[in-house]
Each structure stands twice: as C-alpha cells, then as structure tokens.
Image: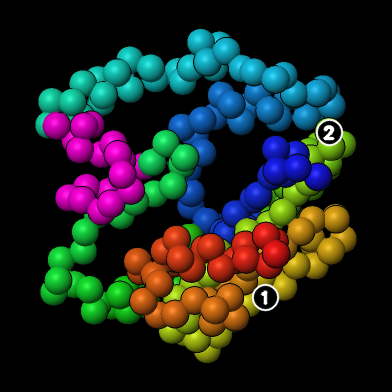
Amino acid sequence: MCIRDSIYIAADPWLINSFDGQNRYEVVANLYRYWSDLMSRNEQPHPFLNSRNHQTSDGINSNVLNILRDTIFQNTNSIASDGSAGAWDKKAYDGSHIYKKRPENQRGQVSSGFSSLLNYAMRNFEYDNQSIRNLEIFISYLQSNGVSVNFILSPYHPDLYKLMASEKPIFLEIEDWFRDFASRNNVGVIGSYDGSVVGCADDEFYDGMHPKSTCMQKLFVNLSE
C-alpha cells in the first residue's frame, strides 16, 4: 500500500485518560463534529474540503490575534525558511516543529523537568471508555476506506522512561494496552515509549518528551529497508 493510503496516529498515553485535562481539540471542534458526523453515517470522505465552510466560530478573535502577532513581528520570525533553529520556535510547512536555540547555560538541564513531566495530563489516570470507543470507530472508518493505520509510540528520554518505570508504571501499562489494541484491530505499531529500545541517545531529545528528528528517523529505518 502506498504512503498516501496510510495514516500515523501519535499514541500519546493521555489519549485514553479520562483525567487528561486537555482541551486544545476545541480549536478544531467544528472539524471534529464534521468527521464524527461523516463516520456515524459511514459516508466516504470528500477529496477536498472547502475551508470557507469549516471556519472556527471565533474567527474574529483569530483575526485579532493574527494582527497582534504581525504587530510584534513574531509572524515573520516564526516562519521556517531553512529548518535551522532561531530565536523563536517555528513550524515548518511540512508540519514539523523546529525548536528555538537553547541557551548555552541550559543545554545540560534537560533532566531538570522530568518530575513534572510524570504528571503532564497524567496526574490521575482512568481509562476513558468513550475515547477508546471513538478511537475504534475512527480506525474502523479509515480501514473501511482502504487506509492502513499505524500507531506511533514517540520515545521518551531514556532517563525519564526509567523514572516512569519506577514511579509511574502506568505509562508502561498503557504502551502494552496500545500494542494489544493494535494487534486486535490490525493496526501497525512503530516505536516505543522507551527511547533506549528505539536506539535514541540522551542528546537526541529537546526535553524529556520531545525527541529530535534524528531520534524519530530511527523509528522508520526498518520500514524503508
């Protein structure tokens, strides 16, 4: 199956947590409702969407924010032209994130925030049955339309993973859950929360939970061979 018939889902642990506290999806709530309705009727997706029919309800506020960004010159500074790190975080046109340059005196402090990362959207945990059901419906819909589905288990810094294993083993349980779910639903699995299993070194992470491109590329080595 060619690459355009595949989709990769980032299988973050809080996706199935009732107490994740995440609300960023509300920014694209209209698209969420659109696809949810489409899947409930089991209709085939349209080749193209007209963005004018799917604007956010707070479009006026978005325009104000755009003007503000332009005013303080962040808009031009945040456009990635060559992929190199600069004074601002950037978003490349291919969707990849380019982190700003880390000051020299902070480059050895990657591990300083590990304890707080254990609780990021995971202070409390309970399996979210509705989210799991939504995931099942989404995957079934994709597969019924000829799309191959794969989970991406993005690696954590090896030292943070060791901390997870000793202080919050629910992360390890959730990886096993995703692998079992994938096995039962004909979904591929790429990577592991354990950065050392993937082969990522300590210096291949921006922080505890964000691997650099050199680390992520290792996940796909076997796919291209």
- Residue 138 at x, y percent in the picture: 75, 40
Nearest to the observer: residue 74 or residue 169: 74
- Residue 11 at x, y percent in the picture: 62, 58
Q: Answer left or right for 7 relative to 158.
A: right
Q: Name the residue: 25% across, 39% down.
A: 78
Q: Answer left or right for 152 relative to 216.
A: right
Nearest to the observer: residue 205 or residue 222: 222
**Is the magenta region chiefly helix, strand or loop?**
loop
Q: Residues within 10 Å of mark 2 (few under 14, many from 20)?
A: some
Residue hosting label 1: 173
Region of the chain picked out in magenta, as a range? 73-91
Q: Where does the C terminus fall, quadrant-wise?
A: bottom right
Q: What label does residue 25 carry, if any? A: none
Q: Answer left or right for 193 relative to 158.
A: right
- Image quadrant of residue 223? bottom right
Residue type at mark 2 is Asn
Position of 177 relative to 201 (above/below): above
Q: Answer left or right for 193 relative to 129.
A: left
Residue type at mark 1 is Glu
Nearest to the observer: residue 169 or residue 123: 169
Q: Name the residue: 54% across, 29% down.
A: 29
- Residue 49 at x, y percent in the picture: 61, 17
Residue hosting label 2: 145
Real-space CA distance between mark 1 and mark 2, rounded to the nearest whole angstrom: 31 Å
Q: Earlier in the sequence, mark 1 or mark 2?
A: 2
- Image quadrant of residue 105? bottom left
Q: Nearer the viewer, mark 1 or mark 2?
A: 2
Q: Name the residue: 75% across, 49% down.
A: 149
Q: Name the residue: 52% across, 63% down.
A: 216
Position of 11 relative to 104 (above/below): above
Q: Where does the N terminus fall, quadrant-wise?
A: top right
Q: Residues within 10 Å of mark 1 (few under 14, many from 20)?
A: few
